[in-house]
Amino acid sequence: MIEPRFIEQFRKMETPFYFYDMNLLRKTIETAKAESSQYGFEVHYALKANNCDPVIKAMIDAGFGADCVSGNEISKCIAAGFPSSKIAFAGVGKSDREIETALENNIFSFNCESIPEIEVINEIAGRMGKIAPVALRINPDVDPKTHEYITTGLKDNKFGISYRDFDEVGQLMRTLPNIQLKGIHFHIGSQITDISIFETLSLKVNAITSWFDKNGLYLEHINVGGGLGINYTDPKNESIPNFKAYFKAFNDHIKLKPGQQLHFELGRSLVGQCGQFITRVLYVKQGMETQFLIVDGGMTELIRPMLYKAHHQIVSLTSKQAEAKYDVVGPICESTDVFAKGIQVNASQRGDILAIRTAGAYGQVMASAYNMRGPVKEIFSDNL
Ligand code: LLP
């Protein structure tokens, strides 16, 4: 999966770092673009998954919009060249300053999560002489059957407006002078691998849009968020996610009115497989019962295994020895700084290089400076 010429270069390079296969990124984006545009669907790239410049540029080149969750992400997108008319702004806790940034830049829509938030946006927009375009994020109470920490559309999650508030929200949409209702928005969770979940979501969406129809509230767009899962256990055989089945599920099940447009906010599925975390074995340590590979990267660079017990495949790039059983652990002063326990890796020694696969999404962006670790480096195949 990593070309031998790159591995030769890695041997001479300081580790750890993220390595991005830009050809795979472009192929993934092309596939998503082809599968979505055949139905006229609009994709916004969820910048939170990976915000490095070459990735952002590839998304702009594909004609995608952006899904932002902070004022800083909005500013970054504008500076990088995303059209402001394609920027959606989501989040349960938008600050006044962030709302101003979004209004100054005339973005596509605020995905609004609560009545108090809508009232504040109306007030700030009024002060600025603007009309804020709003999509209501609805909590559809659909179980995405994914990890509990990345589930967002169940009724006890903090996200979205509940059915209970529909009448009041409908009334606000008719009366608030500086709010314009543009659409509705959903995002039920991330790393969803069962496509039938998206069919269930589509049917819920249909029921909800008919409430808006009945109440005389016109929706220009329906945004169904992101969530398409990727293959962490066998990335080699599924390096590009099943965009075909994903978009088809929505096309087959969502009922759109003439002129109504379907939008998506994909993050992980666009960037997950193109990134790998490259780390070097510092020490092989024989514990009482366990053999440890102590590597130079840790939870400060890639926290998913520690935070979510997420599985990432770990392979040796430099050892051809028979496999042995190891716990692969980082250097951070925390017992949780463990990438994997009891896994088979080619027998390794000090200096061997490991790749932790499928690390392009929610990897570098979640890095921290704990233990005064430096910013993690990012290497792009185009530049090697
Ligand atoms: N739209 C909204 C409103 C979201 O909250 C998210 C992700 C997305 C779109 C993009 O979803 P995706 O296509 O990437 O599934 N840090 C966690 C994942 C958190 C996802 C947060 N929301 C992880 O490492 O698994």
Image (cartoon, helix red, strand yellow):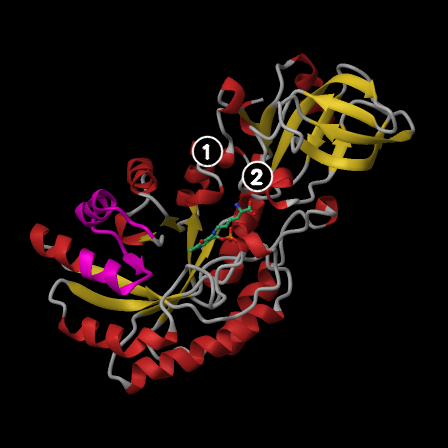
In the rendered image, the residue lying farthest to the bottom is 214
Magenta highlight on residue 99: yes
Q: Provide the residue span drawn in magenta.
A: 93-120
**62 displayed left or right of 227:** left
Residue of label 2: 360
Q: Which quadrant of the figure contains the C terminus? A: top right
In what element is the residue under mark 1? helix
The image quarter in which residue 342 lies? top right
* Mark 1 C-beta closer than 8 Å to ligand 1: no
In the rendered image, the residue lying farthest to the right is 322
In what element is the residue under mark 2? loop
User: Can residue 373 be seen from the camera position used here?
Assistant: no
Residue 291 x, y percent position in the rendering = 84, 26
Q: Is residue 356 above or below residue 145?
A: above
Q: Which mark is residue 54?
A: 1
In 3D space, how far apart are the residues under numbered discs 2 and 1 (Cα atoms)? 13 Å
Q: Residues within 10 Å of mark 1 (few under 14, many from 20)?
A: few
The image quarter in which residue 165 lies? bottom left
What amino acid type is highlighted by mark number 2?
Answer: Gly
Residue at the (58%, 29%) spot, across then down: 18
Residue 143 x, y percent position in the rendering = 56, 68
Q: Which mark is residue 200?
A: none
Residue at the (53%, 20%) spot, across then down: 371
Q: Is residue 287 above or below residue 269?
A: above
**80 displayed left or right of 367:** left
Q: Which mark is first along the chain, 1 or 2?
A: 1
